[in-house]
Image: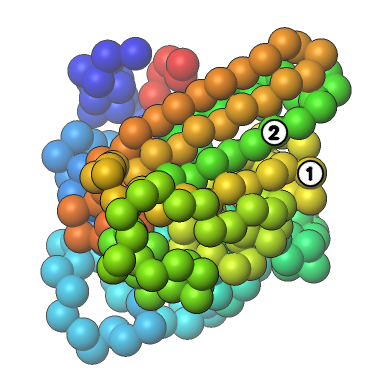
């Protein structure tokens, strides 16, 4: 669907503006806000931003309220809250977000590797009649895999290939000398649950793949450092009763955080825009 269609249908509609809350104000959240301001200024209002230090000057959206505790979400009448603050924030803010907003979009899906947390959030969503939404993240869209999973799937493998600098300050440094790397090197192979636990910043997207297909314990994840590339690459392969699937994306890294892809922010923008669009593709 052309970009102009979403922008026009959102800006010309007579309904009130979507009231949005954002948890976190790092590279992804600020990029999402920037794009929404450019594309949906008259259709979406960022009502509140949750951060740990409210005194810090962060260049927050004009008129957005700054909070630091989940209880402060009460009474804000939010349509959607998006989390972009990292795995611990999902547990801290999740239940309150589901009680005080109609939808809670979780970027740090590695938190769902904790089945106890996911069960608590699902229970909160049912009680509040709200909804947990999982954005497609760096993969753009996994609707095809979710559709394929209606029939039995035999296997799903997700390879995450990034330049060495994107793996710095992670457990990858325990397995490979990132500074001395001269060839493509696989340093991790395991389940999506194991990848999410060991690499929460880098493997969120593998959890999205798992939730779309055969689950956290059957989805196989390979993590690779490749000094010959500059983009973050995702390769998903699946086979089953539907046939075979091969999906590859080469994403530009987010300018302010090489561990994340630009597509991660774009997928959140798309999710938010779809919630107000008259036609969703």
Picture layout, residue 104 above or below residue 268: below
Where residue 13 appears, as percent x and y from the top left, is: 31, 24
Tell me the element at label 1: loop
Q: Is residue 79 above or below residue 195?
A: above
- Along the line of sight, which residue is nearer the eye, 213 or 84? 213
Residue that numbered label 1 is attached to: 218
Task: Locate residue 77, reporting x and y percent.
Answer: 47, 57
Whether 165 is drawn above or below 244: the answer is below
Residue 8 vs residue 150, the one in the foreground:
150
Residue at the image point whose x is 80% and y is 68% from the top? 116
What percent of the width, then of the height, locates residue 17?
Answer: 33, 41
Q: Can residue 197 be seen in this view?
A: yes
The quadrant the N terminus occupies is top left
| Tag shown at residue 156 | 2
Q: Looking at the image, which residue is at 75% across and 55% down? A: 122
User: Outermost residue, right direction?
Assistant: 152
Image position of 193 (left or right of 254): right
Percent position (x, y) of residue 99?
Answer: 63, 62
Q: Do the residues labelled 1 and 2 touch (CB within 8 Å)?
A: yes
**Circle 2: element type:** strand
């Amino acid at each position: 669907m052309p970009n102009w269609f979403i922008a026009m249908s959102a800006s010309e509609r007579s309904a009130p503006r979507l009231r949005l809350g954002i948890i976190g104000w790092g590279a992804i959240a600020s990029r999402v806000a920037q794009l929404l301001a450019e594309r949906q200024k008259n259709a979406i209002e960022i009502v509140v931003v949750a951060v740990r230090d409210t005194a810090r000057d962060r260049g927050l959206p004009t008129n957005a309220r700054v909070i630091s505790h989940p209880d402060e979400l009460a009474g804000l009448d939010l349509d959607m809250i998006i989390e972009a603050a990292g795995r611990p924030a999902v547990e801290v803010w999740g239940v309150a977000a589901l009680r005080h907003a109609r939808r809670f979009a979780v970027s740090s899906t590695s938190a769902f590797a904790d089945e106890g947390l996911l069960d608590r959030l699902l229970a909160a969503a049912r009680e509040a009649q709200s909804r947990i939404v999982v954005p497609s993240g760096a993969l753009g869209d996994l609707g095809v895999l979710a559709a394929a999973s209606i029939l039995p799937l035999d296997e799903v493998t997700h390879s995450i290939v990034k330049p060495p600098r994107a793996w710095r300050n992670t457990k990858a440094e325990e397995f490979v000398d990132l500074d001395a790397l001269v060839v493509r090197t696989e340093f991790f192979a395991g389940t999506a649950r194991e990848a999410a636990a060991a690499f929460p910043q880098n493997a969120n997207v593998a959890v999205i793949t798992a939730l779309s297909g055969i689950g956290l314990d059957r989805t196989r994840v390979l993590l690779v450092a490749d000094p010959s590339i500059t983009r973050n690459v995702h390769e998903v392969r699946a086979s089953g009763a539907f046939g075979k699937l091969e999906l590859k994306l080469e994403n530009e890294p987010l300018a302010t955080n090489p561990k994340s892809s630009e597509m991660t922010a774009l997928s959140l923008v798309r999710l938010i825009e779809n919630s107000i669009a008259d036609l969703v593709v």
